[in-house]
Amino acid sequence: MNTILGALPDAAHVALLLGFPPLLLGVVNRAKSWFSGRAGPPLLQTYADLARLLRKEFILSRTTTGVFVAGPMVALATALLAGLFVPFGSRAPWGFAGDAVAVLYLLGLGRFFTTIAALDTGSAFEGMGAAREVAFACLSEPVVFLALLALHRLTGSLQLSVLLGSGLVGAWHQAAPTLALLTAALFVVLLVEGCRIPFDDPNTHLELTMIHEVMVLDHSGPLFGVVLYGAALKLFLFAAFLVRLAAPVATGSPWLDLGVFILGTLAVAVGIGVVESVMARLKLPHVPTLLVGACVLAGFGFLLAWR
């Protein structure tokens, strides 16, 4: 009986990982609709879009190879695997010493395959989007690594279940400025990795201004559904990282901790909707400036943690 009860939180973790991410996109869109005075799409619209895409056929260009099909699949698989190490409540189903670094490399591997899938089409537009994606990643990934090093200093571990565990409650009392700087920096990373305004606009159809969307112009049907679901999953993982950093609640009940986490991720989705409602998309030359600013914030947090 104890074994079964102990496995239930892990099952809930997997169920949340698989089923919850599309809801975040619905919450973001409803928040934006509320700001503009519109009714907006239903909260579950993303689920309906995924179901519709899965029923369609997909068309492959003659210039593409198996890399084009493998790109979205590998990106989705790496995100799902990374999600098993990220704690949603009190702990994650899987974990080992140093798994925080492994999770970042898994997400980097997914980005690599998404990029080469775009290059595989031979399209100049998709190559332009891939170049932008990689260039911005060079500025956003150091922010996450600096945050991990600072958290390692505060918690003494590089395992995500410890880095983002209950030990952060005491850290907020002792090193609140450090954690506040890291939270602000990681929210900027969340926006750029989630392809949200002010860095990217997932609703635009102007190739010259797109970043992530231009990389998947040739994907269609079920393959595009995999891309859409993978993007929602990646946004959910970064939101989970942010929630566990900003609100490392430890009530002693895994179910209550999971409930608090769900409310936190919904609040992050509303926050994204607010940002997209009050800000316009930045000009591309200004995007690196904001990412460098996030890196400076994370750098100051790192220095404060190691002083």
Image (spheres, rainbow, N blue to C red):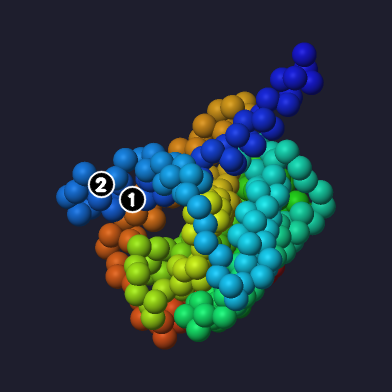
Amino acid at dot 2: Gly
Comparing 39 with 193, the one in front is 39
User: How many residues crowd mark 2 within 10 Å: few (<14), some (14–19), many (20+)?
Assistant: some
The answer to whether residue 17 is visible is yes
Q: Sequence-wise, which precedes: disc 1 or disc 2? A: 1
Furthest-front residue in view? 62
Give the percent coordinates (x, y) of residue 168.
63, 48
Q: Secondary structure at mark 1?
A: helix
The quarter in which the N terminus is drawn is top right
Give the percent coordinates (x, y) of residue 42.
32, 40
Q: From the viewer's perspective, tell me whether residue 21 is left or right of residue 34.
A: right
Give the percent coordinates (x, y) of residue 302.
63, 69
The quarter in which the C terminus is drawn is bottom right
The quarter holding residue 116 reads bottom right
**Residue, disc 2:** 40
Q: From the viewer's perspective, tell me whether residue 200 is left or right of residue 10.
A: left
- Numbered label attached to residue 306: none
Q: Is residue 59 above or below residue 291?
A: above
Furthest-top residue in view? 1
The residue at the point 25 percent across, 50 percent down is: 33
Q: From the viewer's perspective, tell me whether residue 303 is left or right of residue 189.
A: right
The residue at the point 63 percent across, 36 percent down is: 13
**Residue, disc 1:** 29
Q: Secondary structure at mark 2?
A: loop
The residue at the point 59 percent across, 57 percent down is: 175
The residue at the point 62 percent across, 67 percent down is: 68
Disc 1, disc 2: CB below 8 Å? yes
- Could you tell me how many numbered marks the image carries? 2
How far apart are the two marked residues, 1 and 2, measured between alpha carbons?
A: 7 Å
Give the percent coordinates (x, y) of residue 143.
59, 70
